[in-house]
Image (tube, helix red, strand yellow):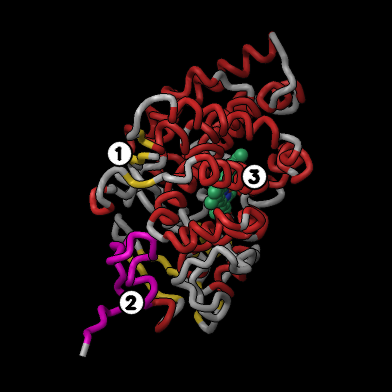
Amino acid sequence: MTTVEPIDAITFPAARGGCPFAPPPAYQEALEQRPITRISLWDGSRAWLVTRHEDVRTIMGDRRFSADARNDGFPFLSNGRRELAAEKPSFIRMDDPEHARFRRMLTGDFIIKRVEALRPEIQQIVDDFLDRMTAHPAPADLVTEFALPVPSLVICRLLGVPYEDHDYFQERSRILLHNLSTADQVRQARDELTNYLEELADRKAQEPDERIVSRLVARGDLTRDEVASMSLLLLIAGHETTANMTALSTLVLLRDPAQLARLREDPTLIKGAVEELLRYLSIVHSGTVRVAVETAEIGGTTIEAGEGVVCMLSTANRDASVFASPDELDVGREARRHVAFGFGVHQCLGQPLARLELQIALDTMIRRLPDLRLAVPFEQIRFRKDAAIYGVEELPVAW
Ligand code: HEM
């Protein structure tokens, strides 16, 4: 008989088990046995863990649950994240109508039609970085030579941020997204990035261009702080997520030659494959956080006003009532109901861009490097367990 850990006492975040691509066993057990369950956070506070697909969507679409960290009881998943939300929150941590006011200023830039027009430019960027990587003898670290620079250069061009400064903002975004960063480190990284973007905004006021930061400045109805905070959100969300997704997807496909072969044989599968990889990997692996601002009954559980909720996207994406054989990667699966981009009013603004970048990057890499392989044993790969966005530290490959 196996003993089951008392599931009302899950310490968050729980450790992953044998498969580094699967959610922690404690969350999966919760999904099967008690889909809305208690967790205790790093500071000893309690919150609810919501694991089912249906409940996650209900909560994320329900105005009784707030994304605004200024509300009492908001569950902070690390000391650093508390620091980040304490002052000058960006619109990801606001509720409507405040949130909608800022989001609306950017939606036009990320609609499918506008993003699709970037295809030739993104293809060129992908080709250039692959050329550079393969110009030297193998091995190479796919993270630093391909997965990270592609989305980083794309978001820099869209925002009008000089790509030459990438070391500066990548180092600091890393600190912001690491669960173990101290409050001091987070404050310093945030302040430095904010100053950097405020100075950029000042330069754009003098020498305007057609890029996002400049257009936000030119509107005239935003403070310098607001421009910097919106730009910071886009800069960080725009490269770390897609970068980790590219590297992790490559790794999972290299570990599953049958699925990789299907993609090589049938290029039309790539769109669906990206959805399946988003579902299977669920890189926003500590979920999305909300606080109840009114008492609500969800899936038979009463969540009181002032209680925090963690919507576990990774278990929702492996909910067998929605996805058959959820633990299997199947690049031919219809996976579009996944919640890897969240759900409701905060659903990822950049998703058309992320999709296009992933489709082009993975498809081009697969086709151009038919002999792509890991250059170290799988066991040596280090996973980013303590970061807000899951991924690998480095991915040594040969071709
Ligand atoms: C929001 C995931 C790429 C910009 C979100 C949320 C998720 C997510 C789960 C919802 C957070 C919440 O409800 O609390 C991802 C994943 C990506 C990705 C998995 C890549 C594979 C991008 C890119 C951009 C971006 C490329 C920018 C260009 C944003 C913004 C929000 C957001 C601005 C906040 C939206 C709002 O609050 O209205 N993303 N994202 N993301 N994402 Fe992404």
On the rendered structure, is 364 left or right of 204? Answer: left
- For the residue marked with disc 1, what is the amino acid? Thr
On the rendered structure, is 93 left or right of 379? Answer: right
Dot 2 or dot 1: first in sequence order is: 2
Residue 391 shows in the view:
yes
**Residue 281, image x and y in percent?**
46, 58
**SS at mark 2 in the image:** helix
On the rendered structure, is 117 left or right of 128? Answer: right
- Badge 3 crowding class, 10 Å Cα cut-off, few under 14, some 14 to 19, many 20 or more, is some
**Residue 270, image x and y in percent?**
61, 54
Q: Is residue 312 magenta?
A: no
**Residue 218, image x and y in percent?**
75, 21
Indicate which label's residue lies in the foreground, 3 or 2: 3
Question: What residue range appears in magenta?
Answer: 2-29
Residue with the mark numbered 3: 356
Dot 3 or dot 1: first in sequence order is: 1
**Residue 102, image x and y in percent?**
69, 39
Dot 3 or dot 2: first in sequence order is: 2
Residue with the mark numbered 2: 8
Q: Which mark is residue 182?
A: 1
**SS at mark 3 in the image:** helix
Secondary structure character of the magenta stretch overall: loop
- For the residue marked with disc 3, what is the amino acid? Leu
How far apart are the alpha carbons under marks 2 and 1? 28 Å
How far apart are the alpha carbons under marks 3 and 1? 35 Å
Residue sitting at x 74%, y 41%: 116
175 lies above or below 11: above
355 lies above or below 52: above
How far apart are the alpha carbons under marks 3 and 2? 40 Å
